[in-house]
Each structure stands twice: as C-alpha cells, then as structure tokens.
Image (cartoon, rainbow, N blue to C red):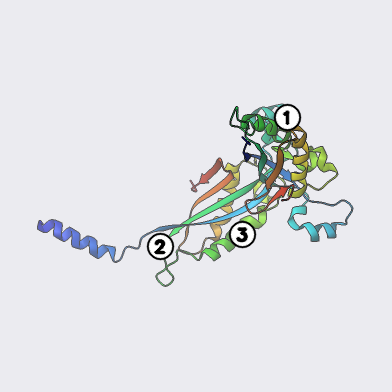
C-alpha cells in the first residue's frame, strides 16, 4: 500500500534587531531605497518562522517526522543563533548579505537542509511582520 | 407596587434622560524597534544574570503593538467620543513616528537615562500622549504588547 504524503509544519519565533544597508552605495541611495529600514541604530521584529517538511507518513509511527526532533533541530541551529540577537552584528552570514526577510529565509533553509533527510521536501516561511512574509523555495 | 418604589422608578427614568453613558475607545497602532535591557551601573555579568538574552549588547528587537484607550461621553452630534482618525494622528505624531524603526535606548528622548523595559516605555508613552488629549477625552489605558505572550498595561496611577 502506498504511503500518503503529508506536509507537517512547525512554528517557532525569534526576536531580533537588524537594519538594511548596502555598503557599496552612498548614504543617499541607501536612504532612498531602504527608507526607515536603513536607520543607523537598528530596529527589530518578532519573526515568526514556519518550517514545512513534506514526506510520506511512516506506517510504524504515523509520523512524517517526529515534531519534537524537528523543534530541537530548529532551536539548536536557528533560534539559539538568531533569537535576541542583532542579525547584522551577531550572525556571520549577514556580514556579507543584507538581512532582508528574503535572505534570512534562504539562510535558514541552507542551515536546516543538511539536518533533514534528503527524501523530505523542506520549505521555510518567515513572517517579518503580520503583513510581510516570504517563502523559500518559492512554489 | 408600593408608592415609594414607583416614585424611585420614575426618578431613575427621568435621570437616565440626562446622564450620558461613558464609553471606552481603543485605537491600535504598531511600531518595530530595537532595544536592550541593561543597567549601566551594573557589571556585564550582573546584567546577563538578571536580564539574560535581553541584555545582548548588540540589541534585539520586536514588532510592538500599542493600544491606546480613551474614555468619554459621546458627542450627541457625531456619536463619537473622539474621531478615531484624530486619535490615530495624535498617536502617530507623538509616539509612533518617534519610536518606529528606531533604537529605543539610543534614539528616543523620553527614554534617555531609563532602563528600556516595556514598563518604563509605557509610562513614557502615557506622558507623551497626555497633554494632547482633545477636550472632553480622558486617557484611560496604554497597553503595550512586546510579544504575543508579554504585554504591559498602564492606567496612569
């Protein structure tokens, strides 16, 4: 009997400071493009992270994946590094790229992908605010 | 019905024509800001021990939700306690424009010299708004939501 494919979601959150800035541009261009997000002393968000794992239901457990295990992976690999941090100053990946929601989602994906078996599909949804959120990989 | 009760009921009905009910109106706004909890008179170790991750010297941040509740009697011509757009404009000018996309420790004059807890922040917001309340409208409560699980209310006491 073919096992059913199901998507499971784990929601986590982290609270972080950041600012958007391109060091290759002059200040006027940064202000024009990024607006208030470029202010020099940083601002912050309560980020909501949704990790989506898709795969077949294991008939012996009824799980796609053990959600406690998934939560522990996210806590160790992402939350412990991002929560209550300054993304620009405290997270090495953002020394060279702008910590936009798009880039944060890509970075999170790349950190988690090796931790989750290859036969599972992985997608990251990240809410920067209740109205602005991104998904990677895009559907 | 005894005569005294009938007289009391008539007096009550008469009074209700002239006593206006009091209503509470809440306007919700939001701002996104960085901050840290840090007592400059303490060592780094003591700050870390008391404030934990909130003492990160490089800041962290939140999407803050701000709920401003006013109370008053409705204007008989409009049915409003206060025009909600006017209240929003007052909050934006004196609070949101000062706090949004800012560093609450470094950029906000009314937080200078204070520990940047939401308790101190909500007290500061109350006092920034109080002088700008329209006539006949009383500031009743400031509620500041730091995360879905943590919020503070201040009633001006």
Residue for badge 3: B92
State the CA–CA distance, disc 2 to disc 3. Answer: 24 Å
Residue depicted at 58% across the width and 55% down the height: B29
Work out whether residue A72 or residue A67 is closer to the camera in this orientation and state it: A67
Write the residue at 80% across / 59% down. Answer: A33
| Marks 1 & 2 on one chain | yes
Residue A60 pos. (x, y %) = 60, 27
Sequence order check, earlier mark of 3 and 1:
1
Labels 3 and 1 within one chain: yes
Percent x, y of residue A113: 76, 37
Q: Nearer the viewer, residue B10 or A52?
A: A52
Say what secondary structure mark 2 lies in: loop
Q: Earlier in the sequence, mark 1 or mark 2?
A: 1
Q: Residue furthest right?
A: A24
Label located before the other in sequence (2 or 3): 2
Report the disc number at residue B44.
Answer: 1
Instruction: Provide residue B120's location: percent of width, then percent of height.
Output: 59, 43
Is label 1 in a helix, a strand or a loop?
helix
Using the numbered discs, state the Cα–Cα distance from disc 3 to disc 1 in whole angstroms: 35 Å
- Tell me if B135 is positioned left or right of A15 in this view: left
Q: Position of residue A31 (x, y in %)?
A: 80, 58
Q: Chain of mark 3?
A: B
Instruction: Establish if B108 lies above or below A87.
Output: below
**Residue displayed at 71% across by 32% down:** A80
Give the residue at mark 2.
B73
Q: Secondary structure at mark 3?
A: helix
């Amino acid at each position: 009997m073919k096992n059913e494919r199901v998507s499971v979601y784990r929601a986590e959150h982290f609270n972080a400071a950041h600012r958007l800035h391109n060091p290759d541009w002059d200040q006027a261009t940064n202000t024009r493009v990024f607006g208030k997000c470029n202010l020099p002393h940083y601002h912050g968000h309560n980020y909501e992270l949704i990790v989506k794992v898709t795969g077949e239901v294991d008939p012996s457990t009824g799980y796609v994946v053990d959600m406690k295990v998934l939560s522990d992976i996210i806590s160790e690999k992402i939350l412990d590094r991002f929560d209550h941090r300054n993304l620009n100053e405290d997270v090495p990946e953002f020394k060279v790229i702008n910590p936009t929601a798009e880039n944060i989602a890509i970075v999170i994906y790349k950190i988690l992908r090796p931790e989750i078996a290859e036969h599972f599909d992985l997608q990251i949804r990240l809410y920067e605010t209740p109205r602005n959120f991104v998904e990677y990989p895009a559907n | 019905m005894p005569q005294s009760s009938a007289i009391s009921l008539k007096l009550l009905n008469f009074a209700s024509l002239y006593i206006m009910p009091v209503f509470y109106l809440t306007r919700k706004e939001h701002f996104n800001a960085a901050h840290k909890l840090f007592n400059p008179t303490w060592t780094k170790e003591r700050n870390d021990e008391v404030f934990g991750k909130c003492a990160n010297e490089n800041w962290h941040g939140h999407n803050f939700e701000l709920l401003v509740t006013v109370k008053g009697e409705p204007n008989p011509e409009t049915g409003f306690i206060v025009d909600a757009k006017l209240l929003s404009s007052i909050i934006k000018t004196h609070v949101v424009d000062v706090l949004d996309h800012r560093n609450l420790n470094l950029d906000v004059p009314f937080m200078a010299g204070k520990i940047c807890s939401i308790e101190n922040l909500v007290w500061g917001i109350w006092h920034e708004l109080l002088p700008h309340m329209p006539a006949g409208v009383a500031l009743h409560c400031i509620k500041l939501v730091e995360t879905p699980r943590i919020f503070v209310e201040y009633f001006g006491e």
